[in-house]
Image: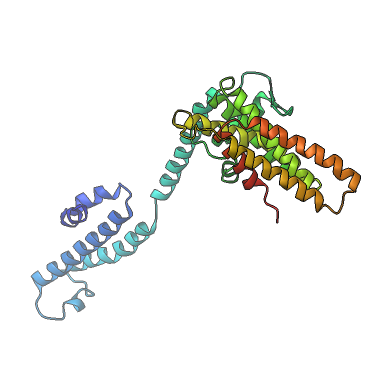
Amino acid sequence: MYLAALLLSSPVEFTLSWAKGHSLVRSIILFRIVQSLLLDTCCSFRSANSGDKWLEKCLVSDNTDTTINCNFVKTLFYIPLLTVLGCSNPTKSTDTKLHSDTISDQSNTRQDGNSKYYTTKDILVIATETGDTLNYSKSEFNSIIDNHPELYNDNVQDPDPTYYCADNKSGFSSETGQDEYYMLYAYFLKQKNGISKYADLRKRLIDIYSNINSLYQHFQHGGTYFGHQGSRILAYAEFSVYLYKYYEDRLSKTYDINKQTSLYIQFLRQLVDDEIQNDGETSAKDKVKSKQELNAMVDNIDKEITDSFCLQRTQEFQYEHYQYY
């Protein structure tokens, strides 16, 4: 409809449309102006001359054919001029400016929306359940708020995809940086979940996960992985708290799970026995001591698992993060 209206409009209306800066409009305007000039030329000549040699007359200047020659010269003049104009792209800088303004507006909006998470303290100290602390100046912490909205937005995900899918890992790309990121994840999600309401569940999950981590650390004779896991456990436990909060009113597995828990604990004790027995790097005397220490960890796990939710989250944590073949 728009294209048809342009083709049927007058040259004056086309000229006015030129100012709108649309490349399609400019192309059509070029066509219409050139077409109009050519038609004026042909019609003026044919009104005064007849025959098939009318093109030759366009090159001859005399009084009779003044109108013809003037129109033809105008045509030759306008074609290259309009071509040059048509090849320019005045809208490019305008589009770029609009795009830049949009980005600026989005950035300002995002920061304005994040301001409620800013700290007003000159120094913010974040203490964790594992004894670690994070210290930030006001500008450092507020910069994290601006650059990492995934840490506190409503689209809560497991800490692993949250970290690995983050667009910006500036300051958190190293192993210790990742540890810090996971502790911050736990800090923000804990406030969303409720600090005091789920304090007992949080503590139990952290204790269970920490004991699982310690078991495998012994099986593998140490390693930096387990040290980093000690910090990241805060995030895994807090995400489990978040899941519990989400399903709290819809938990259906409320029956007695003592037998299931007993079988799981039996599995852990068997794992301890097998690992110690097949450990060629530990002396017989040290194996006795290790077995006692590791079974004490299993006792702690047994004590903390009190419902089906904790049992399933414990198994998920173990099988997701400790796979050795």
Residue depicted at 34% across the width and 58% down the height: 86
Above or below for 225 versus 304 = below
Q: Going by the image, does 136 lie left or right of 256?
A: right
Q: Going by the image, does 265 lie left or right of 48?
A: right
| The C terminus, quarter of image | bottom right
Q: Going by the image, does 121 lie left or right of 64?
A: right
Q: Position of residue 11 (x, y in %)?
A: 20, 54
The quarter of the picture where residue 65 lies is bottom left
Above or below for 273 versus 300 = below
Q: Position of residue 273 (x, y in %)?
A: 77, 47
Residue depicted at 62% across the width and 18% down the height: 120
Most foreground residue, 60 or 134: 134
Most foreground residue, 217 or 227: 217
Let me know if residue 172 appears in the view. no
Q: Position of residue 295 (x, y in %)?
A: 76, 38
The quarter of the picture where residue 142 lies is top right
Above or below for 261 versus 195 = below
